[in-house]
Image (cartoon, coloured by chain):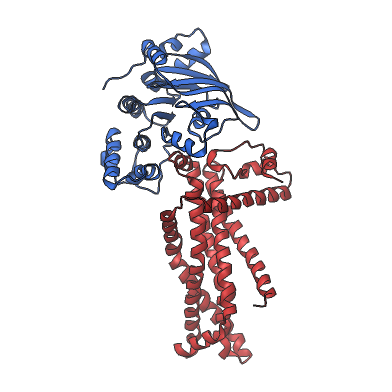
Chain colours: A blue, B red
Amino acid sequence: MTVPGNTRAHAHRIKNNGTAVVEMEHLKKSFGNNHVLRDMNLSIYKGENLVVLGKSGTGKSVLIKCIVGLVDPDEGKLVILGQDIAELKEKELVEIRKKIGFLFQSSALFDSMTVRENLEFPLRRQVHGVTKEEMDSRVKEALQNVGLSEAIDIMPSELSGGMRKRLGLARTLILKPEIMLYDEPTTGLDPITSKEISSLILKVQKIYNTSSIIITHDIECAKRTANRIVIIKDGICVAEGSYTDLEKSKDAWIRSFFE
Amino acid sequence: MNNLMIMEKTNLQRPQNHKQGAEIPSEKDLEIAADSVFDKFFLEVTALTIFTLRFFKEILKPPYEFNELMKQSFLIGYRSLSLIGITGFIIGLVLTIQSRPIMVKFGAVSMLPAMVAVSIVREIGPVITALIFAGKVGSGIGAELASMNVTEQIDAMQVSGTNPFKYLVVTRVLAATLMLPLLAVFADVLGLFGSFAGVNLKGDVSSYLYFSQVIQSLEFKDLFPAVIKTFFFGFAVGLIGCYKGYYSNSGTEGVGKAANSAVVFASLMVFIIDMIAVQITSLLQY
């Protein structure tokens, strides 16, 4: 497997040659008096892994929930795959959302369904006229890609934390999304499993040619997966660059993330 | 108080997308917003009304979740049969044994089957079934949806291209509405068998004689209002269970609270609906 790498050159190449798949301008979101996103300006380019770092409560998760449509921004412009979200009708929004995968922090597996049923659920809901054979083949392919082929007929409660993450990823990948959003993919996992999940993120980027936003506090995960890193503070993007750029930043607060 | 005012008062901005159209404050928000018990009650009733209106809006919109409705009807109906059946039988038996001495005292022991039948069919069967249903199904729905909320399963459902309100709430409320009347009739029938057993504990009445008396004593005006009100009981139990679960607070504490308040609130609603139903029945001279 070729790892895209997290070099400054690679990030530069993607940024200059790639099309922006997600663009946000002056995005704002508040919950009562809590102004979570104050003025967010960010672009994600085709094929890149963008890691978002920041302290807890700075709006990282809200940011990706705005992209997937779980939270509506109060103000600002959000363009996904070239379409301004504010101008789309509900049906068009659903079509856009089909192209976005979301790996939840808790994996959010449907615990009343088996592994197979968990994977079949989005297929049944979003792909019309899919045959049983095709569904079976896509389920097996998705499980194989995350290394969980043997777990097809068991319940999610029988899976370990790492396996649950991988299954959550497989459920997302079954629809072959163009954009992947990872909400703290390695939280609560041991270092070895975290490394496996990080490798899986890179594998997904390569196989499915996805553009990804990875929210994480795990600096090892960031180092392994990021083509570019942004740091958020109080709902504003305060720093951007490659891992090596930011690691050597003159700002002590930014450097503190990498220590 | 309109929807926007509730949001302002509870200091809650436009909530997550699957909750749109029913911008309902959670219990925690209600506690913050409510200046008094009256305020809290008023806000809760308003929020439940908005939730109910959304139910009627979503029920008419395609796509229709028939498969999930069938599954929920099976889970809610079939899996409650044994509990409802045993309870109905025991109620019939106990009511007969308890009533017998007083009937003997007034020399009306031959009226015992008719008295018990009318009591069970008109009132005790539907109400007891609804209360057990609230305890088993209402709390189950509340806990299940609250747990799905806590573990982000409802969000995951929305991301998977499914309207979670339609898939989770509409199907469960409909299943509860349709299944409770069937369960109540089942409880009535087993209650009558329980009563037959009770009559025969201290007497010797043939099944033919017993059930002839029962059938003669029951009229359409006994059956019809009793069955109709069970639809409302089922609707209330399903709706309150879903409302409490769908908008529960985060955390495991929220799951317990949702299950508990679903039972309490649904049981209270059963009595309120029963009281209204009895008044309407009296007015219509049933």
Quadrant for residue A27, please give it: top right
Most foreground residue, A194 or A214: A214
Most foreground residue, B192 or B253: B192
* Residue B20 picture location, percent across and down: 57, 42
* Residue A230 picture location, percent across and down: 48, 18
Name, please, the residue furthest toward the bottom: B107
* Residue B217 picture location, percent across and down: 56, 85
Q: Which residue shows up at 45% across the image and 38% down it?
A: B159
Q: Which residue shows up at 54% across the image and 47% down it?
A: B246
Considering only vertical position in the picture, is B118 above or below B184? Answer: below
Q: Is residue B139 visible?
A: yes
Q: Is residue B140 visible?
A: no
* Residue A226 picture location, percent across and down: 39, 19
Quadrant for residue A218, please give it: top left
Q: Which residue shows up at 66% across the image and 52% down it?
A: B45
Q: Could you tell me which quadrant the C terminus of chain B lies in?
A: bottom right
Considering only vertical position in the picture, is B133 above or below A181? Answer: below
Considering only vertical position in the picture, is B36 above or below A195? Answer: below
Considering only vertical position in the picture, is A20 above or below B259? Answer: above
Q: Is residue B107 left or right of residue B63?
A: right
Name, please, the residue furthest toward the top: A250
Most foreground residue, A153 or B202: A153
Most foreground residue, A8 or B111: A8
Number of numbered discs present? 0
